[in-house]
Amino acid sequence: MSEDGEKDKERAAERPSRPDTAAARRARRASADRTGTPAKAGSGKGAESSKRPAPKGRASDKGAKTEGKGAPTPKRNRQETKKSSLFSRIGRFIREVWGELRKVIWPTRKQMVTYTTVVLAFLVFMVALVAGLDFVFLEGVDVVFGD
């Protein structure tokens, strides 16, 4: 072999090949250390040593933070108050419905005509399909059991 071919083989042996399967990618990720470089064979860094510690800030941790991103969501102090009247609850419901309807992106007339046409064409196709299958099965029952 030429020297260039031997050098290419040496470089390929130094650089790990790209994994072909998902399982190979997971194994490669598991064998990588925290800096992102793959662990060398025989260095003692395998899948066991590269496991990341559990995230901090869980509610079960004794030293859990009380504020910030890692802190658990505080419970709300809901004071029992008197229920509002039926009319005020209905009014609030209508205001909320009206607010949600303002957020809707309504289709244009052209879009509505297109959607309606597509739905009606699909409906005609399905009715014809079911009627055709009904006729075929009726004829099949007549052939099997006689008339």
Image (cartoon, rainbow, N blue to C red):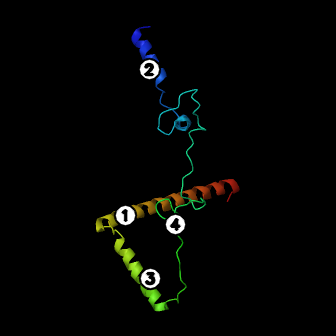
User: Would you say 2 lies left or right of 53 here?
Assistant: left
Query: 13 above or below 3?
Result: below
Query: 65 above or below 76?
Result: above
For numbered disc 1, what is the local secondary structure? helix
Q: Amino acid at mark 1?
A: Tyr
In the image, what residue occupies the spot 34% across and 74% down? 102
Quarter of the image where one finds residue 75: bottom right
Could you tell me how far apart the alpha carbons at marks 3 and 1 are, in whole angstroms? Answer: 31 Å
Q: Amino acid at mark 3?
A: Phe
Could you tell me how far apart the alpha carbons at marks 2 and 4 are, in whole angstroms? Answer: 52 Å
User: Would you say 139 lies left or right of 92 here?
Assistant: right
User: Would you say 10 lies left or right of 53 here?
Assistant: left
Residue sitting nearer the eye, 26 or 58: 58
**Residue named by callout 4:** 73
- Where is the N terminus found, in terms of image quarters? top left
The mark found on residue 93 in the picture is 3
The mark found on residue 11 in the picture is 2
**Residue named by callout 1:** 115
Label located before the other in sequence (2 or 4): 2
- Of tags 3 and 1, the one toward the viewer is 3
Where does the image place residue 7, in percent across and percent down from the top left?
42, 15
Q: Marks 4 and 2: in contact by CB < 8 Å?
A: no
Quarter of the image where one finds residue 101: bottom left
Label located before the other in sequence (3 or 1): 3
Could you tell me how far apart the alpha carbons at marks 4 and 1 are, in whole angstroms? Answer: 44 Å
- Of tags 2 and 1, the one toward the viewer is 2
